[in-house]
Image: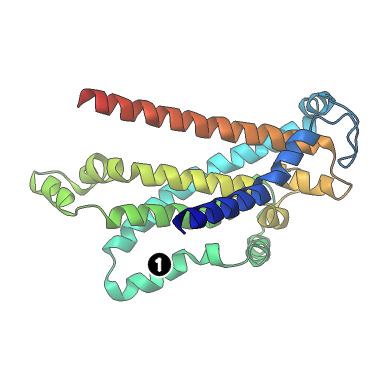
Amino acid sequence: MRKHKVRLSGIYLGLVLLFIYLPIGFVAVYSFNESSSTAVWKGFSLKWYQALFQDASMAEALKNSLLLGVISCLAAAVIGTMGAMGLIKANARAKGVMEYIATLPIMIPEIILGMVFMAFFAVLRLPFGMATLALAHTAFCVPYILTMVKARLAGMDPALEEAAMDLGASPARTFFDITLPLVTPAVLSGSLLAFAMSLDDVVISIFVNGPKINTLPVKVYTQMKFGVTPEINALCTIMLAITLLALAGYSLIRRVRVFDKKKEV
């Protein structure tokens, strides 16, 4: 009976993984298609990768997206870390309301956030472009970092900060020498998640984007209106390969560290 359950769970897991990764596999395969159609295979070719690397507008959109992601994540990391520290030290009555308000950008639909940001920036008469994109992306990136850092602070022993202050450290010195090193992993993990959300955003970017600035998701979305070409498949394949290489590198570094610790013991 137990073997039967294990076999059924394995089949179920295999079907789920097939459902998730089969479309991604088709995208990768058809990025090497000779034909301009994504439905007909006419032979192996690298011409769509060549066309992608020669597309100046696509390279400009990628540069804008990376710059936007870095700016918004750095700003969100500072705001989210400070906000998490404020939430931890807030009184119990106000903490629940403040936590709910801080996580609202995650729960509100993106189309509503985009319309709100567009109206707000129009009232302030801010020129739509990189500045408005950075402000909007920072606003919806903050909750991801704040949530991670708050969870890390909640599990941290408050006696560490108290001991540092008892030894004569100022609040600023205590933060930089004790608190910040302990919450850095949470800040980094939240920043990576926020960077991925910023790089992937389409809806909010369309509302607050300027006529002279184009991000990669918006660029791809506008091209899809005229039909998906294998050039988009090539772009998706390259981004997928970079992600897999980053995960493999992280896994290798983690295994080396674990091996070194066991060797020391």
Q: Residue furthest bottom?
A: 93
| In front of the other: 29 or 177 | 29
Residue at 29% from the left image edge and 54% from the top image edge: 153
Residue at 70% from the left image edge and 45% from the top image edge: 22
> Does 183 sit left or right of 171 as displayed?
right
| In front of the other: 9 or 193 | 9
Please say if 163 is above or below 247.
below
- The image shows residue 37 at horizontal and vertical percentages of 90, 39
- The answer to which quarter of the image holds residue 122 is bottom right
How many marks the image carries: the answer is 1
Whether residue 33 is visible here, answered yes or no, is yes
Whether residue 134 is visible here, answered yes or no, is no
- The image shows residue 123 at horizontal and vertical percentages of 65, 65
Please say if 152 is above or below 173.
below
Task: Name the residue type under label 1.
Answer: Glu
Q: The C terminus is located in which quarter? A: top left
| In front of the other: 8 or 144 | 8
Please say if 96 is above or below 233.
below
Residue at 88% from the left image edge and 29% from the top image edge: 34
> Does 3 sit left or right of 182 as displayed?
right
- The image shows residue 51 at horizontal and vertical percentages of 83, 27
Q: Residue furthest left?
A: 167
Can you identify the residue that label 1 sits on? 99
> Does 133 sit left or right of 189 as displayed?
right
- The image shows residue 112 at horizontal and vertical percentages of 65, 67
